[in-house]
Amino acid sequence: MDNRRGLQILNNDWAGPALICLASIIVISVLQPSFLSPFNILVLLSAIAVNMVIALGQLVIIGIGQMNLALGTLGGLVGVCFVGAIEVWGVPTPLAIMMGLGIGALAGMVNGAIIARTGISAFIITLASLQIFKGINLGITKAQPFYGVPDIVKQFGNTAVIGPLPWLILPMLITALGLWYLFRCLRIGRYILAVGGNRQAAELSGIDTVGTVIWAHAISGVLAATAGMMLVARLQIGQPTIGDDWLISSFAAPVIGGASLSGGHVSIAGTFFGVVIIAIITQALVLFSIDPFVVQIVLGGLILWAVGINRFREWRFAKMEAAGVRP
Amino acid sequence: MTMVNSEAAPQKTSAEDYRRSSASLQVLLSNEFGLLTLIIVAATVFAATLPSFTSPFSLFTLSRQIGIDTMIGLSMMAVIVSGGLDLSVGAIGTSAAMAFGFFAERLGISLILCVPAALVFGAMLGGINGWVIVRSGVHSFIITLASLSIFFGVMIYLTKAEAFRNLPLEVTAFGRMKAFGPVSVLLVTTLGVCGGLLVLYRLTRLGREMLAAGANPRAAELSGVPVGRTIIACHMLTGALAAAAGLMLTARTGAAVPSMAGQLGQDWLLPAFLAPVLGGTLLTGGRVSVIGTLLGATFVTVTTSGLLLMRVSEFWVQAVLGFMLLAAVLIDRARHTILRARGMV
């Protein structure tokens, strides 16, 4: 009985990535003891916090069986609007944060509404909005950063709450727990997964699929906006290039965490461990002073490896089901 | 990525009656005709308001840009045919151009061998994509997302992010050469490739098999098309065309630069999709329009250079391109709705 439960835990989405995290932490800290220094942990956790929010923004859209290419440029646009509003218009910081989240939600809703109403693939609509957000971003900033980040925002992005825990962990925890609650307990969360699993069936069982798609994209937009503003806090300037490099990592983390790109299934814990694996590997390459370009190669390799593992698991489950064993 | 494929369900009822009366309307509603009208209108407006638009130099750079953008569009079109996509075209194009630079500058190999070698290299990278996609059965989006990262990372690692700037003089000369009048030889090259692709899709068995595999893989498999091999061939063609676009950019710049397609080659993504989508190539596969892709790229280039000559900021032009893609797909959808309402599809 105990043995079987242990095996069941290993069948979870997040078990594999969690084991890899643990193993790589042990190996790296043995080889390089400074890896576990409080400062290094602080840096690592800050990176994990931002990348987790980015990955969650993509995870919601993966759950509904689509993809959001515009996630990064929306985050960048909100980042510069946030700092720009404070610097140019003198908007108080809390109001600027609300405005940033509002822009994210609105932009996401427009994306979702166009996709759901026209039935055109999310890929092509978000490719268009990627370009539009980037153009507006560069048009506003003329490719120059805004420097007027308030001190309180800078402190939020660069100081610790307690020990090696950075303040940036806070928005990550709120969004991750919020999404977990959404998918677990709220109707809209179940609707998103139902539409992602089988849109026709969801439609026939009376779910408002158009509304659900708009909701999912609005949530993704809010998460992109949150991540954009978190990066502003961490970098201490409103860089127009924020978000340029989110595309690959935003898909890599959920895929490593076991998300199936056909939709209908998400794993927040798995995504978290995916983010941690990417952060650890990136850090390790820096610690062992390996060429930073290798990160790209490793990231691509990780996606392929994760896709391979996911396919293998599907194949094994199919085989077990065929043999009459409930996985 | 669901998409309603209105082409797939032709209505047979009273099609004969409609055909005669609706033929002219069909032509008027076709992408190619619409694009041609738009190009003529845009070019006339720009030529009338901007004297510099019709200067020989401006026409030369315009024709060169049309040649390059069309080639980028064709490379994506070749894989969209199969119902897939390739995010790594920019990475493949840059890698092939850098390989070309390495062969020509470091190894000093004759250009007659370097050019085909770079094209084969591009086709090989595309072939790797295709092979992994077919063997794993995973959607091309995620596989090419991974391979774009790997190709670009390996290329930067091997070249140490340094450009090849001492290429043979013939490379730069080719980029400046005019075929006739102010028309760049690069555009003529692209037109030749368009001709070749028209022959491929219209007349050859491989081309028809590519279209069949894209329209309905299962039906194609049942009727004896080797779908897996055909999809790999589509990806190889994409790789070779992306390499050709990379070589053309190298000829224009006179150097093989690792950042020619932006960070990770992502700058090619929009022109690559914009031209075929404007031209009426279906993203679900199975339908192709080579001429439409050419006209689509022409329209985009004419509009972009006109706006830049009007001193619109380069940054806002980027936003315009995004709106153009959005408008193109929305108009396309509206067109299908009209055609279906009249029972003409």
Image (tube, rainbow, N blue to C red):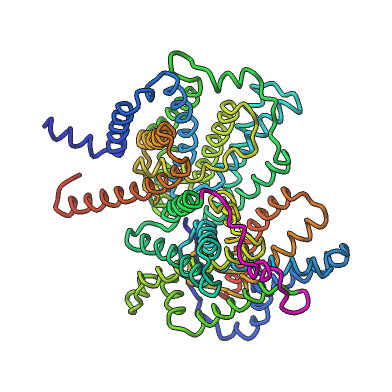
Q: Is residue B248 above or below residue B24?
A: above
Task: Point out residue A153 in the picture as x, y percentages from the top left corner.
Answer: 61, 21
User: Is B164 colored magenta in this rendering?
Assistant: yes
Residue sitting farthest toward the top: A162
| Residue depicted at 62% across the width and 40% down the height | A241
- Asked if residue B194 is positioned above or below residue A154 in the image, the reply reads below
Task: Name the residue located 76 percent from the left edge and 60 percent from the top edge.
Answer: B305
The foreground one among A47 and A27 is A27
* Residue at the farthest left position: A1
Residue A66's spot in the image, x, y percent? 47, 50
Q: Which of A310 and A235 is in front in this view?
A: A235
Q: Is residue A126 magenta?
A: no
**Residue pictured at 58% horizontal, 57% vertical:** B164
Residue B248 occupies which quadrant of the picture? Answer: bottom right
Where the N terminus of chain A falls, by quadrant? top left
Left or right of A276, for residue A20: left
Residue B166 lies in quadrant: bottom right
Q: Is residue A270 visible?
A: yes
**Whether residue A186 is visible:** no
Query: Residue, x 42% and y 77% (percent of image)?
Result: B209
State the quadrant of the C terminus of chain A. top left
Return the x and y of residue B247 as percentages of the image width and height.
Answer: 58, 66
- Relative to A63, is B100 above or below? below
Q: Give the range drawn in magenta.
A: B160-182
B75 and A59: which one is in front? B75
Estimate the x, y position of residue B235 in percent, counting from the top left.
45, 66
Q: How many marks?
A: 0
In front of the other: A60 or A285: A285
